[in-house]
Every structure is written in C-alpha cells, then in structure tokens.
Amino acid sequence: METSSTRKHRPRSEPTPNGRQTQITGNDILGIFEPLSRHAQLTTKQIVAFDSRYATTVRNRLTDLYHAEGDWLVRLSESLRLANSLTTDEMYCLGTDAEDLLKARGIVPSESWVRISRVGGNSNAPSRIFRLAHDHMASHIALDIEIGARAAKRHRFRNHIEIIDNAPERTRTFPKPLRVIAPPTSGAPRWIEPDALIGIDDRYFAIEADTGSESIEGVIKPKILAYREIVASGMIDDHFGIDNLRVLFVTTNAKRMRNMIAAVASIAREGRSTMFGFACRPDLGQLAGAPSPDGRLFTQAWLRAGRDDMRLDLAN
C-alpha cells in the first residue's frame, strides 16, 4: 500500500503503485470533472483554485485520476510538447469515462451541445500555441469570476451550460448554441460568439479574452457593433431567453484597453455606454507563469466609456 511518505516523494509522472485502486469520490466529480465539462482544457493551477480541497490533495488526485484504470483525465502533454514545458502547468481535458459519469449522475445534460460549447477552442489563431494561450485566458476569466462569486456567497453564479439548458429548445438544436445571429448591420459580422457566457444573479455577461492579436478597427469594433445590435433588437431574448447582456473585455495591454474603450465611445450615443466593461491583465498574456484564479475579477472595477466603473459584485 502507498503510504503518505511514499506519496510525498512519488513523481507526478509515475503511476499509482500496482495493487492500489483509485476510487472516484464526490469531490473528484464536482471539483475536477465538472469544471472540465465546461472548459476545453484547464491547467493544474486552475483546477486547484476551483477545487475546495487542499492544493496538495488536488494535485495528488489529478495524478491518481490520470493514471487510474479508465479514461478519466487526458493530459495535453501527451500530444503537444511546449518549448517552455518546464515552466508551464500541465493542462488537463475531460476523459470519456468522466464525461459519461457526469451525464449518468445528471450533473451535465447528455446532449452533444455540452461538449461543443466548452470554454476554449473558439480561437481562430493559426498557431495552436496562440490558441491555447487565448483559451487559457478565457477560462481564467470565467473561473476567476465564478470563484469570486462563490466566495461572496450572496450571489448566484450561472455558467453557460445552465444558461443554454434553460434557453428556448430551438437554441439547443443549433450546431453552436453560443453563436447568435446578428441583425444586418453595416460594419458588423453576421454572428457573434462570446468566449464565455455567465450569469450573476439576474445579470448576464459575455466574456471576450483579448490577447492583442486582433485589429481593434477591423475586428474588435465590429464585435462591439454586433453585441449592441443583438441586445437592441432583442435577439438575445429569442436565443437565450434572457433580457439583458453586458460584455466584459479583458486585454493584456493598458494602451490597447484605452483604445478599445475609445472604440466604444466612437459608436455609443454621446460617447457613453453601460454595456461594455474593460479590464487589463498583462499577467494572463502567456501560458508560462500565468497566475491562479483568485476571484479578483469579481470585485475589481471594470472601466466603461463615459460612465462610472462597473463592479460585478454590485448591481451597477
């Protein structure tokens, strides 16, 4: 049998010793499998931050579950070797056995749209590394806000699976249920698909993770136009069954953030808008050395064009 002392010195790349079976616990299901059902992949730091158990316990459980008999967890390092792998957290995906268990327990719906709508995987960056950096950032933002809302205790957090599951039935039949068709608008795309969609109490937010790779004039400003139109036209009511939506942009450069706010001001009436909030997080720009989600995005101020700052923990 493996003792606490042998566990302490066992490398995380080394399987659980033969003869010791790994039993799936409720904490494994809710602390590891459930968040992975909503995200295309998560780093060790992100999972540890989300799980309510001690950090060492969670790290050991990730190792045990990965090496346990069955397909519970997948490591991206199996198929992708990063140049800075020694300083980059391991990234995990949900295994098929874990996915089936969640469905059997009724924790996530069994429809195919659940997998399709996971946070991450929507980036169009030509490099897989750039896509991973964007997806990591999108997951960090959504998890950070969720962790902050959970810590506050007085707020109800809704993830995108819950929102889609309560949307009109027609929405769940779409190939990509997070994608909303925008009314024909000069300079705007035909559809908009947020990097993540969340709810806090009765307020709803689309999340846009900006790594600085897209033109503000050619991509960001058209996105802003499309978001304005789907709200003004009531498309979000028809698509998601919700009556309000705000958009949270997180970028990695302060000057770029100011230019994005200026883009909103150039479109909005009298240069003022309550719909868009902006935050700058340079520490989320790269996979290597990225911090753990800690809930600060839930309580910090989000800048707006011509309006007072917005906070997610306050109804403003």
Image (cartoon, rainbow, N blue to C red):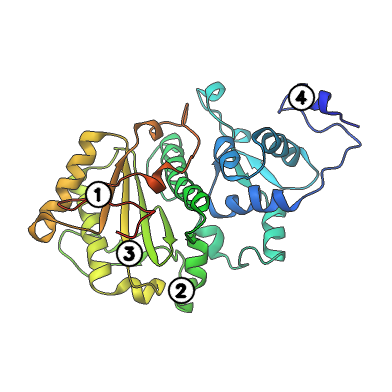
Q: Quadrant for the N terminus, please.
A: top right
Which residue carries the number 1 mark? 309
Question: What whole-number distance in Å separates the C-alpha atoms at marks 1 and 3?
Answer: 17 Å
Residue that numbered label 3 is attached to:
245
Secondary structure at numbered mark 2: loop
**Where is mark 2, residue-wise?**
167
Whole-angstrom CA distance, mark 2 to mark 4, is 47 Å
Q: Nearer the viewer, mark 2 or mark 4?
A: 4
User: Residue 225's spot in the image, x, y percent?
Assistant: 20, 59
Q: Please, what is the three-letter code of the amino acid marked with disc 2?
A: Ala
Residue 30 coordinates in the image, percent (x, y): 66, 53
**Distance CA(mark 2)–CA(mark 1):** 30 Å
Between disc 2 and disc 4, whose residue precedes? 4
- Is the residue under label 1 in contact with that under label 2 (CB below 8 Å)? no
In the image, 4: left or right of 303?
right
> How far apart are the alpha carbons under marks 1 and 4?
47 Å
Location of the C terminus (image quadrant):
bottom left
Closer to the chain start, of discs 3 and 4, is 4
* Amino acid type for the residue under numbered disc 3: Leu
Viewed as shown, does residue 290 lie left or right of 63? left
Q: Is residue 151 above or below residue 164?
A: above
Label whose residue precedes the other's in the sequence (2 or 1): 2
> Which is more foreground, mark 1 or mark 4?
1
Q: Is residue 164 above or below residue 63?
A: below
Dot 2: few (<14), some (14–19), or many (≥20) neighbours within 10 Å? some
* Amino acid at circle 4: Lys
Q: Secondary structure at mark 4?
A: helix
Residue 8 bears which disc, if any? 4
Mark nearer the viewer, 2 or 3:
3
- N-terminal of the two: label 2 or label 3? 2
